[in-house]
Image: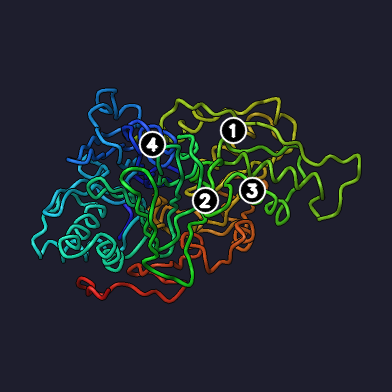
Amino acid sequence: MQTGGDHSGDEPREKCGIVGVSLADRAAARPLYYALYALQHRGQESAGIVTHDGFQQHSHVERGLVGDAFEAEDLESLAGATGIGHVRYPTAGSLDKSCAQPFSVSFKSGSLGLSHNGNLVNADEVRDELAAAGHAFTSDGDTEVIAHDLARNLLQEDLVRAVKHTMKRIHGSYSLTITHDDTVLGVRDPMGNRPLCLGELEDGYVLASESAAIDTLDGELIRDVRPGELVVLEPDGSGYDTYQLVENDATAHCFFEHVYFARPDSVIDGSLVYEVRRELGRQLWTESGVETDVVMPVPDSGRAFASGYADAAAEVDAEGNPREDDDVGIEFAEGLMKNRYVGRTFIMPTQDERERAVRLKLNPIKSTVEGKTVTIIDDSIVRGTTSTQLVELVREAGAEEVHLRIGAPPIVAPCYFGIDMATREELIAANGSVEEIRETIEADSLAYLSIDAVAEALESSRADLCLGCVTGEYPFDVEGEETDRVVDSPSPGAPAADD
């Protein structure tokens, strides 16, 4: 399934953030609202909350940012101590409200609410099968496919088995928070592609895409939800049960969560994102450091990389030799200031306006760069538009040399699993060598981080990471694409109730 959305911007975008809470004796709506604020970076298209008061389900879903989607009276109307929430940036399905989440459905066995982060690669196949069995769909998103399949299974079996059989039927990337009446569930796909973690609050438990949402609620991170695991929160907030529904020998964690998407203060798969990015910066110096007067980040995502890069440069020179006592290395400086009130570049209608938007968003500090050699650290290059503009801006501010270092490998292929990345035709690294890209962006030098360095920084093996966007080989069975492992995809038709 090709990812959708508008690809005219030059930044990859995460699809969604999800959360679920189960509390002892207070309304869930406001904690969910605060948690969604903490996850706002993961989606800005729509926001929604579904709660259950023990008798009926309540829902409020709107387009826009969290602060715009909810009024005080909306939160007051969302009764109940259990619920789930969602922020969305669409990569599958249309932009209209029908694809906003959580998705709600009522059926003979009760009510369901479902929030999804990720992308299924067999959604069309499962939708066709369900439609042939009489299910009516109101959207073109894959979340509704999961909801209908789960509802069908719940008519025949208990909650745990129903979830297990849905997991056997769907194929692709997903982390889910689900309400089944007043019970909140968390599910992570068998490869662990998208993040999901479990936390404890003073009066209950929380599931969230990132631990920063748990921190916002004054909670404590317990652990990551394991790949293939189901977590069931007690409706009264007193505890939780876990079920390992699918076992896999390997994982396919998305390395780009650490490089770009997740908040630096989040812990993802056991690693603090900020420290991983600093280590990626250190690796970048080791692999391709260049002696310049100043190293500066592209705000905000390049900051931790540049900090680690500068720290490593203070210890050894670009040849790997220890510094002399009077050699302090490379100065770390903030050379670009970000205007936080400018809209996303992709909403600009023409290429000229999108390029102008870069100048609106970022402005060089002349005293930092004038008359100096400069290294700029960024997390990625997608189409090259922003990088070209940055190099030009810094040169115009008086830099004598402008070198660019990237804290990730070249992006050479699209993402099918929940990231709005671009098509191969749009990806600059898919259509040119590093030297050709350097010439295009007019930098004095350009270097990317190696895949092995990323794996080392994550203390992982390449086999346990999803590297599709930087290798063109994927951990799921995507039509027309190569895989990097033996993939066991579901066969057509519903799985048998084997246990």
Mark 2, Cα crowd under 10 Å, few <14 / some 14-19 / many 20+, is many
Of residues 296 and 244, the one nearer the viewer is: 244
Residue picked out by circle 1: 393
Element type at marker 2?
Answer: strand
Q: Nearer the viewer, mark 4 or mark 3?
A: 4
Residue that sits furthest to the right in the current view: 325
Q: Residues within 10 Å of mark 4 (few under 14, many from 20)?
A: many
Classify residue 159 by image quadrant: bottom left
Check disc 4 and report the residue beneath it. Answer: 36
Q: Position of residue 427 (x, y in %)?
A: 46, 54
CA gap, disc 4 and disc 3: 33 Å
- The amino acid sitting under disc 1 is Leu
Amino acid type of the residue that numbered disc 2 sits on in the rendered structure:
Ile
Q: CA distance from mark 1 to mark 3?
A: 16 Å
Q: Of tags 2 and 1, which is closer to the observer?
A: 2
Closer to us: mark 3 or mark 2?
2
The amino acid type found where label 4 is placed reads: Leu
Q: CA distance from mark 3 to mark 2?
A: 24 Å
Q: Give the mark, 3 or 2, whose residue is nearer the N terminus.
A: 2
Vertical order, 482 against 431 (above or below): below
Residue for point 32% across, 40% down: 85
Position of the C terminus, as image quadrant, is bottom left
